[in-house]
Image: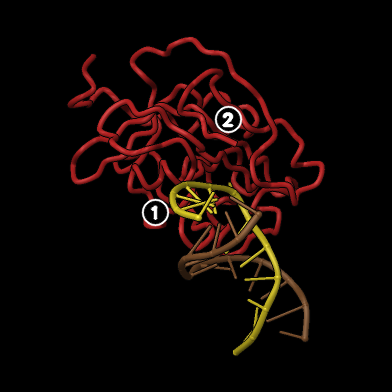
Chain colours: A red, B yellow, C brown
Amino acid sequence: MVIDDDTSLQPLPRAFYARPAIEVAPELLGRYLVRTVDGERRVGRIVEVEAYLGSHDRAAHSSRGVTPRTRVMFGPPGHAYVYLIYGLHHCMNVVVDQEGEGAAILIRALEPVHGIHARTQGPALLCKALDIDRRLNAYDLSGPELFVAEPEEMQPFKIVRRPRIGVDYAGAWARRLLRFYIQGNSCVSRR
DNA sequence: TGCACGATGAAC
DNA sequence: TTCATCGTGCAC
């Protein structure tokens, strides 16, 4: 397998992101998150995500409407929404659906594929491992710094659906099955 | 201008 | 179960 000098990994087309979050989320599983740091590629297979459907989703940051922070969520699809949580950690989303919806997919865990030498089994851990912080907020995922790519060969897997993590404040929305992960994958976050 | 709290992770 | 640590959103 030639992952070393990967000119083969290309950003997914914008149209991939311009669909409802509930549709895009499971399709991100198995695809690669690619980050370029100092000219070196870091590649991880997406194994866990959560869908935030839009401003009507009470668990989504966008549910409070357009604010300085959520502006990116309401922007065009195919961009990164990166925010600071608990004053310590960063989390990364991809903006999806139509502009104005406020929908995004939180990337929760990766399986290291190339150039990653740190843990990636959690949304903040993977950002740390890939050196993703707010400098990349609003970044256009058509690359080259950060993008999602099609793997050379997609391995078959089963998808598990569960309630999202850490959104108990969202009432009925907290119980929706909007967390998706690859069944049996050891890199899926705990809890 | 002040303040409560969080889409987490690590230690105890 | 507790804590680190600070930006955000909303109350006053």
Looking at the rendered image, the quarter that the C terminus of chain A falls into is top right
Image location (x, y in percent) of residue B9 = 47, 47
Q: At numbered mark 1, what does the secondary structure look like: helix, strand or loop?
A: loop
* Extreme residue in the right direction: A172
Q: Which comes sooner in the sequence, label 2 or label 1?
A: 2
Q: Residue at x 75, y 47 (%)?
A: A56
Q: Which subunit holds the residue at mark 2?
A: A
Q: Callout 2 environment at 10 Å: few (<14), some (14 to 19), or many (20+)? A: many
Q: Which residue was labeled with disc 1?
A: A133
Q: Residue at x 41, y 57 (%)?
A: A134
Image location (x, y in percent) of residue A37 = 24, 44
How many marks on residues? 2
Q: Residue at x 67, y 33 (%)?
A: A178
Image location (x, y in percent) of residue A163 = 70, 34
Q: Looking at the picture, does residue A155 appear above or below residue A15?
A: above
Q: Which residue was labeled with disc 2?
A: A25
Q: At numbered mark 2, what does the secondary structure look like: helix, strand or loop?
A: helix
Q: Amino acid at mark 1?
A: Asp
Q: Callout 1 environment at 10 Å: few (<14), some (14 to 19), or many (20+)? A: some
Q: Quadrant of residue A143?
A: top left
Q: Amino acid at mark 2?
A: Ala
Q: Are marks 2 and 1 on the same chain?
A: yes
Looking at the rendered image, the quarter that the N terminus of chain A falls into is top left
Nearest to the observer: residue B2 or residue A22: B2
| Number of the front mark, 2 or 1 | 1
Mark sitting on residue A78 = none
Q: Quadrant of residue A126?
A: top left
Left or right of A18 on screen, residue A3: left
Q: Residue at x 53, y 57 (%)?
A: A85
> Alpha-carbon distance for marks 2 and 1?
22 Å
